[in-house]
Amino acid sequence: MHVKDGVLKYGFVGPALIFLIAFNIFPLLYNIYLSFTDAELSGGLARFVGGRNYGVIFDDTRYGVALCTTGLFVVLAVAVELVLGFGLALALRGPFWGKSVVTTILLVPMMLSPAVMGLYWNFILNGHYGVVNQALAVLGLFQPQWLTDPDLKLLSILMIDIWMWTPFMMLIALAGLNAIPPHLYEAAALDRASNWTVFRRVTLPLCSPLLFLAVLLRTTDALKQFDLVMAVTGPNDRTTQTLSALLYQVMFRGYKIGLGSAYSLVILLLVIVLANVFIRYIASIQAKQGRDVA
Amino acid sequence: MGDPFLKIDNLSKVYGETHALSDIFLFLHAGELLVVLGPTGAGKTTLLRIIAGLEVPDAGRVVVEGMDMTHCLPAERDVALVFQNFSLYPNKTVRQNLEFPLRAPGRNLSKTEIANRISDTANLLRIAPLLDRPATHLSGGEMQRVAIGRAIVRQPRLFLFDEPLTNLDAKLREVLRVELIRLQRDLGTPMIYVTHDRVEALSMGDRIAVLSEGKILQIGSPEDIYQRPNSPVVARQLGYPPINLIEVHKRADQWFTASNHGIVAADRNAPQRATLGIRPENIFPHGGEIPATIEAVENLGASTILLGTWADRPIHILITGETQWHPGDVIYPSVDPNRVVVWERRNEE
């Protein structure tokens, strides 16, 4: 059978394209449309309301709080994960006995489902019967109410997130470290460079594009933080309500589709802007180092 | 002239089952350029890395100016190693690459001193216009100049060059080869230059050490190694076209091949059985009695290589200038008996 190249081309691309339009492009456009209406989940005709939903968002104090909560969460989570992950990668870099076992164990948290992990941590951190507080009780120490104390709730979620995603940073940092050619270290050793100089002038700059990539991935992911909040405190807790949790609250508990759509678009915009800043930064670093990092 | 600058004393290195280096004795005089010649896997790079301090030998000593340096850190040795793959710091400019060794702790050079040394080096290697370019935006030849620059800017007491020209194209190789010889003469810093390239070895070395399978087979001047190789293995390392190796036995003061052709006169004191090494330029296409058939003629311009069959074995003949011969012609080669290298063959061989 002879198929023309032109036909074949569309045959290959077609299914993916249809899928993309049906599940990505169309919902996005429809979402934009909905954000200008007063559509509700309970039904009824959606009426066009212009920019009123956006007005509501910026008047809603919950929005500002959620934005701050999310920002705080993203900055702290990503920073701690980066430092810990890079540190672990540096520690795991050289050869030592049992390296592969240690590395595998360290990667376990990353492989588990966040929702399930949230529920597990709910048990672990429970104020009354949780393992952590029982251990503290045995030691005769103060037992914080990890999940109910308003000052601690966000911190608990942060800790869980850090526990889950530090291995991811470590993995990417390890890949970056392993890509640095060993002869550069030999050249530096012959050049009498100190350990600190080698770290600052060779290791860090050569690893940084991958580290920034990891930060980008983690940042965009953390901006969407939802599972842990949902599992640990529920979506409507003032101290832990992230943007995604607020969106969920508005859309699926308040049934306000139109307003929820507006919220989701604002979050999307935020993520796109941040991602662009990061990507440009990574590209500029790579351009400075040339294409061939090795 | 007292102690040599560098003494390699009974050095051995084993990787698992492989004897990378066995019982290496070597010395290097002040200001000397020693070429270590050997095929890939001979242990050349390992030898350099041990001298540089990047590897620790399993046995033996590295003595520099009378001091045992075998277990010193690379930083303590004050040697510069130029890698085959250049090894520039990719995230830095050419200038920063040259500055890197000068800013090492304990060097305490003033800003003007650093600037002077960099501009001197850049002028010497003709890389001054490249100083502010990123190291990754250079051609191969430029990268290697910068790598050499990074070595000489430090003014080390010993240069180690690990096949620095191998990754460059032929034309550039010739240019840099000449520059390196000049540079080493001008600076007077002793140098060990590792290569598998026979032209580099012959043209650059004050002396050549031939390394094969982790052992030094012969050390001597280029003339020694070329004219008086102590084994067929050494003989094969140098010269193009390769030396003709012919297994012979002696009868009536003549060397006879396996096919019973008497090809050249033998010395009265020569052994009964031997391998003859005859350089292609020491065979002449006429004046002999045994016919040879020419199979291929390779014109190199100033000289011509004839490939033929002589006494039932392949033979290379190098003649100067153009040739009147063509494939299929029959010639009667003769050999200058004074220019034949004779190695005795023992029974087990």
Image (cartoon, coloured by chain):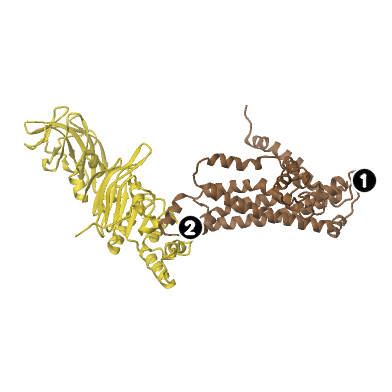
Chain colours: A brown, B yellow
Residue at the spot of label 1 = A45
Chain at tag 2 = A
Residue at the spot of label 2 = A195
Q: Does residue A68 show up?
A: yes
Give the side of residue A233 with respect to residue B181, left or right.
right
Which comes sooner in the sequence, label 1 or label 2? 1
> Which image quadrant for residue B32?
bottom left
Q: Does residue B300 show up?
A: no
Q: Is residue B113 above or below residue A11?
A: below
- Tell which of B256 and A197 is nearer to you: A197
Q: Is residue B228 above or below residue B263?
A: below
Chain at tag 1 = A
Q: Tally the marks.
A: 2
Which element is circle 1 on? loop
> Which image quadrant for residue B343?
top left
**Quadrant position of the N terminus of chain B in the picture:** bottom left
Q: Is residue B323 above or below residue B139?
A: above
Give the side of residue A161 with respect to residue B122, left or right.
right
